[in-house]
Image: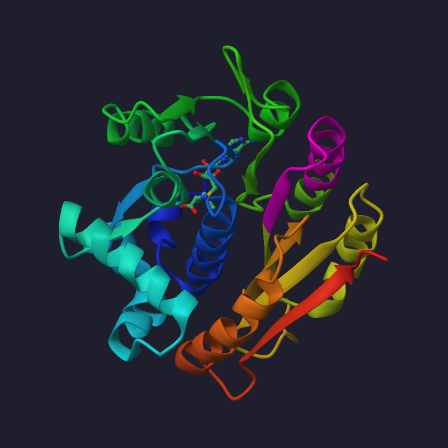
Amino acid sequence: RMNYRHAFHAGNHADVLKHLTVLALCDALTAKPTPIFALDTHAGRGLYALDSNSAQRTGEAQGGIGRLVAEAPADPLVQRYLQAVRACRNEHGAAAYPGSPWLLAHALREQDRIAACELHPEEAGQLKANFAREPRVAVHERDGYAAMKAMLPPRIGAVKFARGLVLVDPPYEAQLDEFDAIIGGLRDGLTRWPQGIFAVWYPIKLRRALQPFFRRAATLPAKSSLVAELMVREDDSPLRMNGSGMLVVNPPWQLDQQLKPALAKVANVLAETAGASARVEWLKTER
Ligand code: SAM
């Protein structure tokens, strides 16, 4: 039973946080010439049209990428993200918005490879069509959590990838099971590929409901992990998504220093109430 369609939510405040973070991770990884492998476990269709019926119905993008483009706050990471969105629009039209596979393909290089998993047949079909002429992107219509076992450590032919990124961006349709699957997937993934960067998106309604997830995340076999959160409202209502976060396991050097000022500016621009805020904190640090 899969009802979630990302087309309703593309370009909202959650996508802004997620995609800013993904670009910061790609840029850190590509600072060295060795090939990068990126696994996108819940990839969606890769490209969205914000003038589609689905997007117009919720209007969520207007409060996200719409406002950010209009205000364009001065910050290197925010500008880098806006530049990527502009590149997407130059290619696909003014109403286009990039999904995570598109951003990975944009930010990574010739020598890098991307595996994008998507379980919904229609979304997977669109994803395949969108990247049919992009040999660096392999689309797999399969369960993203199973892929974290089967596809790690990454290896394509004779090439082993020492460095790279796993993005876990599930729909949270059945909230409780999703956190179990995430922690299980991360534990497997980190055991198989200890040097990989693992980034997980999570929604925030009522903050204290997330405590068990953070406690379990802190016990994962990794030296360090960081959480970066963007709230557009107070985090005190269980009834709606007030913001969201990225858990980054094995974050690259100085990711926190890049995200802090960027998210503070984004929170300012995307605030729905005076309770809007940004937070970047270590869940676990190297000692
Ligand atoms: N990561 C995308 C982006 O940033 O553009 C958005 C992904 S959307 C939040 C979640 C996607 O996961 C949906 O397209 C849904 O069909 C898909 N999905 C749901 N369960 C899945 C599973 N077990 N494995 C892979 N994909 C799944």
Residue 137 position within the rendered picture, expressed as x and y whole percent measured from the top left: 37, 27
Q: Which residues are magenta?
A: 182-200
Residue 22 position within the rendered picture, expressed as x and y whole percent measured from the top left: 48, 51
What residue appears at the point 68 percent right and 48 percent down from the top-left corner?
Answer: 250
What residue appears at the point 51 percent right and 51 percent down from the top-left corner?
Answer: 28
Q: Residue furthest top?
A: 157
Lateral position of residue 108 relative to residue 287, left or right: left
Q: Residue furthest front?
A: 33
In magenta stretch: residue 264: no
When the figure is inspected, residue 219 is found, relative to residue 245, above or below; the finding is above
Lateral position of residue 168 relative to residue 190, left or right: left
- Specify the quadrant of the image occupied by residue 68: bottom left
Residue 84 position within the rendered picture, expressed as x and y whole percent measured from the top left: 30, 55
Front-lying residue, 201 or 206: 201
In magenta stretch: residue 192: yes
Front-lying residue, 31 or 161: 31
- Specify the quadrant of the image occupied by residue 210: bottom right
Of the 4 image quadrants, the one containing the C terminus is bottom right
